[in-house]
Image: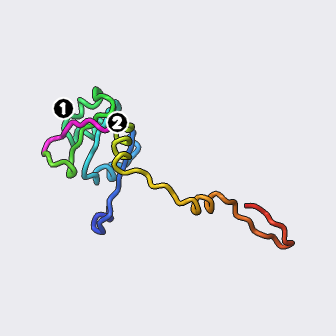
Amino acid sequence: MQGRKYGLGCLLITQRTANVTKTILNQCNTIFAMRTFDDTGKEFLSNYIGRDYAGVLPSLEARHAVIFGKASSCENPVLVRLNDRQPFLEAFRAAHPVQPLPAAEIQAALAPAVQENEVGDQVQF
């Protein structure tokens, strides 16, 4: 609760809002609500996004969410479709390919560390 005055933030992801204290949940500035079936989660979310939107949550399709809070420029909750992982990775990696490590760094990382013990024997760790 004190982190905001120091410019710190936190991301909380949970499937069971009943297991998270209400004090923590009440500090959330933005909510991404995905499909939920438990009454505790729907009841909590209805305080933020309204009963109508909370009532829609059990029928949301996979990879869909209702967004509400400071991260959204809309005053009302918004239904969004989230990225599919594989097409996102393909598009992202096409624009930002992974840079290969230099061969010397790979060899050094893979080589086992060898230390001599008190009698001069080499022992691999």
Q: Is residue 19 above or below residue 59?
A: below
The residue range painted magenta reads 75-83
Look at the image and say whether residue 76 sits in the magenta stretch: yes
Q: Nearer the viewer, residue 47 or 102?
A: 102
How far apart are the alpha carbons under marks 2 and 1? 27 Å
Tell me the crowding category of disc 2: few under 14, some 14 to 19, or many 20 or more residues within 10 angstroms, Cα based: few
Q: Secondary structure at mark 2?
A: loop
Which quadrant, please, contains the C terminus? bottom right
Q: Residue at x 32, y 59 (%)?
A: 9
Name the amino acid type tagged 1. Answer: Asp
Residue at the image point whose x is 44% and y is 52% from the top: 98
Q: Which residue is mark 2?
A: 84
- Near mark 1 (Cα within 10 A), the count class, few <14, some 14-19 or many ≥20, is few
Between 10 and 108, which is closer to the camera in this rendering?
A: 108
Disc ID at residue 52: 1
Say which mark, if any, is on residue 21.
none
**Residue at disc 1, secondary structure:** helix
Residue 26, horizontal then vertical, whole percent: 28, 51
Closer to viewer: mark 2 or mark 1: 2
Within the magenta stretch, is there residue 11? no
Residue 18 seen: no
Please say which color scheme the image uses.
rainbow
Q: Nearer the viewer, residue 4 or 89?
A: 89
Residue 103, horizontal then vertical, whole percent: 57, 59
How far from the left and from the top, in percent, is residue 69?
A: 21, 48
On the question of residue 99 being in view, the answer is: yes
* 75 left or right, relative to 11: left
Amino acid marked by disc 2: Asp
